Image (tube, coloured by chain):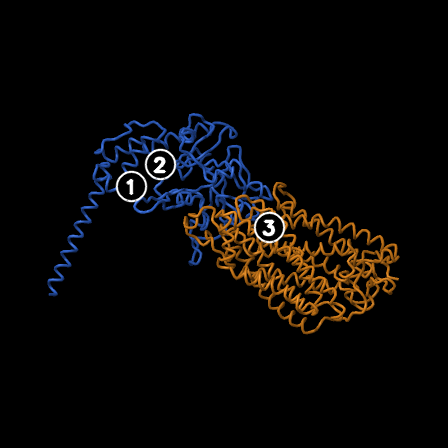
Chain colours: A blue, B orange
Amino acid sequence: MQKSSRRKLLRGALVAAAGGAALSVGKVAAIENGPGPAATTALRTKNLAGALRERGAAREPFPRPAPAVLPATQPLAAAQAAVGTPTSAVARMQEELVRAMAKPMEQRKWAMGIDLGKCVGCSACTIACIAENHLPPGVVYRPVLEEEIGLYPNVTRRFTPRPCMQCEEPPCVPVCPVNATSKRPDGVVEINYDKCIGCRYCVVACPYGARYFDFGDQYSDGTPAKQPYEESHGPEYGRDWSRESVEGVVRKCQFCLHRLNAGMLPACVTTCIGGATYFGDRNDPDSLINELEASGRAFRLKEDLGTKPKVFYLL
Amino acid sequence: MATVAKIGFPAGAVRPSAPRIWFTAFALVWAVAFAAGLVGLAQRITEGHRPADYGTYVTWGLWVAVYQYLVVMAAGAFLIAAAIYLLRLKALQRVAPAALLLGIVSLLAGMILVLLDLGRMERFWRVVLAPDWSSIIAWVVVAYMTFLVVSAAALWLVLRPALAERSREQGLRAGVARALVFGRRDVTAQARERDLRTVRLLMILGIVPAIGFTGGEGALFGVLGARPFWNSSMFPIAFLAAAVVTAGAALTVLTAFFAPGHSGDKHDVVQFLARLTLFALGVLLVLEFAEYSIGLYASLPAQEDAYGEILTGDYWWSFWLIHLVAGAAVPFAILALRGKSTAWLGAAAVLAAAGVFTVRLNAVIPGQVIPQFESLRDAFSDKRLDFQYSPSSMEWLVSLFVVSLAVLLFYVGYQLLPVSGARPGEQPDIRPGTSGATTLDGGQ
């Protein structure tokens, strides 16, 4: 009796394992081969290849070599080629950056676009930003907001990276009592760390929660020794900031101005694995950022406030 | 002479000391509070903001609430003094100098606390010397400075005759009087009349910065369109009502428990102050009801959630039990049922003042605990990126330090300056026909 039960259990486990494996293979095949009738039924709108293809056909504004609609059997690589690889967009933005930097500051207007359909919520941009700007604990210029939308089985997740919006009408600027924050001619809202008194009025005035107070926390707090990386100096605004010099002040994303000055795109743009973040000069009529903004898919967070963010999102 | 006579110093027959038991008990509590506060201050100086519980999302915490409480009380004290001198409120004349002193001390204490709240304390001078006039804070600081100058000048003029008299004596107080009288020893009727006119002028001038920074403190919140809970024109007005409640309560307690004199002598003053305090509290409650009911009926989640946090959140008891029951219902009941007892009225004032403290907390904190985006709550995990806030021990201790420092400063001022007017030989008198050489009105 006992033996028989064990055999039954083993048999059941084997059947379950085989079924699971078959299902997994089927899913992989469906993702790589495009939505065949069976796969479409099984995966519905969650099919990555299908989603990529649709988005590429309908929404990508920059030139693409491949046809917009792919045969159902075309592999994923081809699907990616069809929508334009992230690299090609980055290369184009890089060229435009060099072009913009050749102009006087007041003639360029930086803007950022984030394609929510492409963002996979990997938070690579968040981490890249922290590493690039030597951010301490509790200071995160670009968190990724995660939302679950819909009801099962029609469920999806939306990832919304939230850098500083670099508002054209920034509510955080006029509240500063010591003129430590201002809007530059190129549209970037900057903070003068040498002037900031740390009153945090700008923090409460920001409708997007995009300003952070640097408490002086260290990653090694509570451990025996401070680590060398904590002693390294931050590069923001093209200056050399020691850890102590930015303690007690308010900090925020500044579109990696130090990188722009060196001819490089912001860290979040170059590290985005999905190619979801775009950056460029809004004053350049031929720029990719302008094409995207005019695509009809662009929207801004809390547009009703009239702050005119220079970060827009694509749906 | 007599035409100028309405304003002056506390009247005659008073006993030299407050009930000893009150003073001893209070001194013990103060000593413990001050010692504990010094620990918090040491922590703040050596460890900066790290031991604080506020973060980036709830970035203004207990210190901002206490600071606002103190500066708003300063304005209230000045407004009460101004009312006494300008409206010739005889019943309150004996507390007018104390009100001016309270205003100065309270504002200084508030400024010390907000200084400790700054991330970079060493740069505070920038607000004074390199301000940006587009910021309300810059204007509020100008109002503070003006207020301090006007209050100090008014207090000096009010005390000058008594200082002149005392400067002829021996001892520490006489030495202080000699240092402060600045050679102006003229106590003739003409001199006092001139001083009185100037005091009245200063009172008028001082009303502007007092109302200015009280309203400004409310406007700090009110102008923030990003925060629906704060974005209300009710804040500046409610702050004015709270100013009178807190200052009136402080003066009631001071007179009831610590001012020299018979209970019978003091009772009228205490009763008047208590009634004034509770009237202002009534106005505050009406304003609060208007604000809360409109906010809730607007049915905007961003507003509703903040009110919900106050009414039913983690600290619901601070609103219902401390503010409404202990801080409002009980004081009104005391006034109605035990209105003839000076001590009960003093207790009612303590409760009202405590209740308004929760009003301050419930103005500062709930406005920040509602995220700008709901998903911001979980976007990144860090203790500074939290929408929950509960003041740390350092925050409580530093607040305790500042409040006990204010008490110390007030006590020193009260002892060294002829504020109470109660010391024999320096007794000013405002009553026509009574002798008393040190009154502004001339007295004789």
* Residue occupied by mark 1: A46
- Tell me: B246 left or right of A180: right
Q: Secondary structure at mark 2?
A: loop
- Tell me: A118 left or right of B134: left
**Residue B47 horizontal/vertical position (percent):** 52, 57
Question: Can residue B41 be seen by looking at this rendering?
Answer: no
Q: Secondary structure at mark 3?
A: helix
How many angstroms separate mark 2 from mark 3 (CA)? Answer: 44 Å
The foreground one among B371 and B164 is B371
How many angstroms separate mark 1 from mark 2 (CA)? Answer: 19 Å
- Mark 1 is surrounded, within 10 Å at the Cα level, by few (under 14), some (14 to 19) or many (20 or more) other residues, namely some
Q: Amino acid at mark 2?
A: Gly
On screen, A84 above or below A156? Answer: above
Q: Nearer the viewer, mark 3 or mark 1?
A: 1
**Residue A138 horizontal/vertical position (percent):** 45, 50
| Tag 1 and tag 2, C-beta contact below 8 Å | no
| Residue A275 numbered mark, or none | 2
* Residue occupied by mark 3: B122
On screen, B223 above or below B154? Answer: above
On screen, A281 above or below B46? Answer: above
**Residue A232 horizontal/vertical position (percent):** 45, 47
Residue at screen point 55% across, 63% down: B321
- Tell me: A187 left or right of B90: left
Which quadrant of the view contains residue A175? top right
Dot 3 falls on which chain? B
**Residue B158 horizontal/vertical position (percent):** 79, 57
Residue at screen point 44% across, 48% down: B374
Residues indicated by labels 2 and 3 sit on the same polypeptide chain = no
Q: Amino acid at mark 1?
A: Lys
